[in-house]
Image (spheres, rainbow, N blue to C red):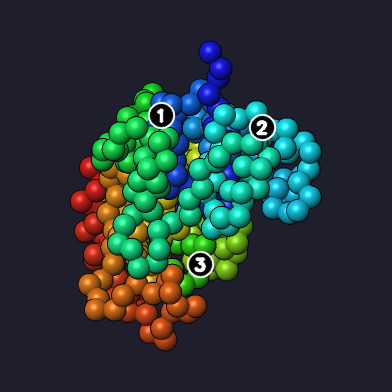
């Protein structure tokens, strides 16, 4: 019997790709092998988590020819080894290019639903995969939250239940809850006997410096795979709407996520123990339809520390 092999092409950032992880778990029931072409660090992450066999770096000049008129011959040979190609991209022309290379149709879908649609990104992907015949049955909440995957993945791991990771950054400055509130949160958690620890990425040097000025240590990371090892030993997580928050939720941590201008109906991180904090407002979330936040974004300013703490202790039940 011919081995069924799936090749996924995904041009999205960390949060977008992590939201495909539940679908990849479902696809593994159909395919013997799954490989992905995406940002290099994200591909390494997916391999480390056992979701795929191999990740190819999208930023490599070798693979960049896939998006040009002169596609490298080695790329053509590679793609033709797979029985199915799944393209998750806003570039619908890529579907035709792949079909011409392989001589077979490929499944294409945009990485998220239209801006005004009130459907979660992961649910949108599941629906498209069902419509395309790659997933045979409707998913359940256990599937989309990866409950079984998380149980298997965390079994036997040593967890420091008092260690609470705080990530005050985000891929967009527009989504940041004020750092002063995160610092105050850390003070309160310490008084409750917990051990809050800050984490910042390489693009968040401004936050790193300010946190250290407050005599607090910061765990800085450059590789997502290193961050996974650290996360998997923690008892909880608090952060903004970010790709790192999506990863924490996927790993099964007790998570509190502060949302501001983005819509949690569409972008809430998926996990069995996730709480969202966002004030009740009349305005529609504007992140995907406006280039900037308003001058006084109440969606962030009005998110109270007390609300975050209450949400944390609701979900922190280890």
> How far apart are labels 1 and 2 at the CA level?
33 Å
SS at mark 1? helix
Depicted 289 relative to depicted 259: above or below: below
Q: Residue furthest top?
A: 1
* Residue 105 seen by the camera: yes
Residue 124 lies, in percent from the top left, at: 37, 51
Residue placed at 25% from the left, 76% from the top?
281
The reply, left or right, for residue 136 in relation to residue 65 is: left
Nearest to viewer (mark 2 / mark 3): 2
Depicted 315 relative to depicted 101: above or below: below
Q: Looking at the image, is mark 2 or mark 3 earlier in the sequence?
A: 2
Q: Which residue is mark 1?
A: 153
Q: Which residue is mark 3?
A: 172
> How far apart are labels 1 and 3 at the CA level?
30 Å
Q: Residues within 10 Å of mark 2 (few under 14, many from 20)?
A: some
> How far apart are labels 2 and 3 at the CA level?
37 Å
Q: Which residue is mark 2?
A: 80
């Amino acid at each position: 019997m011919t081995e069924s092999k799936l090749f996924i092409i995904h041009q999205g950032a960390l949060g977008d790709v992590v939201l495909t992880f539940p679908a990849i778990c479902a696809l593994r029931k159909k395919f013997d092998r799954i490989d992905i072409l995406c940002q290099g660090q994200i591909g390494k992450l997916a391999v480390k988590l056992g979701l795929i066999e191999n990740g190819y770096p999208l930023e490599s000049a070798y693979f960049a020819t896939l998006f040009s008129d002169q596609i490298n011959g080695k790329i053509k040979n590679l793609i033709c080894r797979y029985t199915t190609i799944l393209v998750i991209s806003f570039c619908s022309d890529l579907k035709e290019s792949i079909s011409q290379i392989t001589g077979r149709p490929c499944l294409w879908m945009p990485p998220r639903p239209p801006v005004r649609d009130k459907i979660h990104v992961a649910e949108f992907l599941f629906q498209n995969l069902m419509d395309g015949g790659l997933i045979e049955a409707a998913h359940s909440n256990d599937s989309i939250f990866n409950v079984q995957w998380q149980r298997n993945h965390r079994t036997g791991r040593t967890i420091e239940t008092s260690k609470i990771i705080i990530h005050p950054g985000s891929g967009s400055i527009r989504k940041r809850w004020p750092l002063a509130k995160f610092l105050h949160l850390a003070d309160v958690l310490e008084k409750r006997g917990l051990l809050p620890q800050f984490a910042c990425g390489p693009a968040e040097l401004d936050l790193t410096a300010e946190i250290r000025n407050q005599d607090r240590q910061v765990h800085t990371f450059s590789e997502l795979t290193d961050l996974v090892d650290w996360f998997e030993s923690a008892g909880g997580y608090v952060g903004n709407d970010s790709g790192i928050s999506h990863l924490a939720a996927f790993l099964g941590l007790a998570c509190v996520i502060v949302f501001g201008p983005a819509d949690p109906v569409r972008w809430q991180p998926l996990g069995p123990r996730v709480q969202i904090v966002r004030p009740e407002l009349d305005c529609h979330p504007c992140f995907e339809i406006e280039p900037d936040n308003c001058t006084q974004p109440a969606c962030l300013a009005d998110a109270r520390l007390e609300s975050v703490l209450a949400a944390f202790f609701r979900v922190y039940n280890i």
